[in-house]
Image: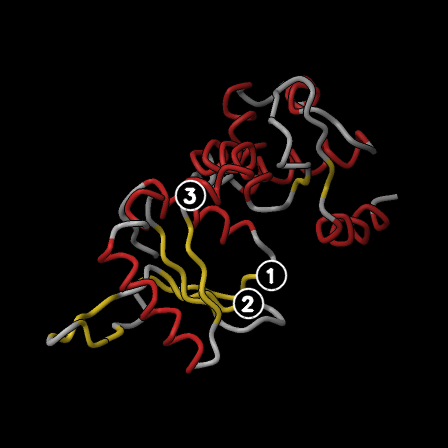
Amino acid sequence: MVHYRGMLKRAYVYLLEYDDAVLSYEEQPLCIQYASGNQISRYTPDFRVQWQNLRPRLVACMPEITANAPTSIRNLTAAQLWCQQNHHDFALITEVTLRPHKILLSNLEMLAVHSFAPIPAPTYDYLLNMIISIGGPFSPEELVQQTPLLDPMQTKSFIWNLVYHGQLLTDLTQPLHFATTRLRLSEHLCSAARPSSTRNQ
């Protein structure tokens, strides 16, 4: 469980959860001390991220106007110096750096609402069999029509749950739409489903 405070940090966590190159991340990983005049100041970055094939990264999340304040500039400079000395990279995340990810973040926030409710095993098997029987890309609306034994609103929620967890795939950089978004089964589920379907033939 990762704690966050503020919409910027929440948005960045969504991006970390979505990024396959992220191995792990932690909040407030360390406290950096540095001299500021005659005093010792302290700064705690928001996240440390471990990446596949990249150096670890310290991350600060704050509004652009806050980042330009004198205290923030001193804190961020201290963090950058620490990173240079400790084989880390550094990133500042603001509303400006997140702007290109607006559609993706909107999709991830919507999908997250449906991500925690477990799908009962019989319902999951029923959905999987119907998806396999469709045999190609489909819209959420088409799958709801093909599963009359389930409540349509619940089915819609289950579909978004499967998308959030990567079991159903689509382009999340495009707006999600119930009638027009095209979904397909992940390769992992395709491989898992083939042996059982072969046995049943």
> Is disc 1 placed on a helix, strand or loop?
loop
Label 3 CA crowd tier, 10 Å (few <14, some 14–19, many 20+): many
Q: Residue 21's mark?
A: 1
- Give the percent coordinates (x, y) of residue 88: 47, 74
User: Closer to the N terminus: mark 2 or mark 3?
Assistant: 3
Q: CA distance from mark 3 to mark 1?
A: 17 Å
Q: Which residue lies under the disc numbered 2?
A: 51
Which secondary structure lies at badge 3?
Answer: helix
**Mark 3 vs 1, N-terminal side:** 3
The residue carrying pointer 2 sits among few (fewer than 14), some (14 to 19) or many (20 or more) residues within 10 Å by Cα, namely some
Point out the residue furthest to the bottom here: 85
Is disc 2 in contact with disc 1, using a CB cutoff of under 8 Å? yes
Residue 6 at what x, y percent from top left? 29, 43
Q: Is 121 on the left or on the right of 133, as rendered? A: left
The image shows residue 155 at horizontal and vertical percentages of 56, 26
Mark number, residue 11: 3
On-image quarter of the N terminus: bottom left
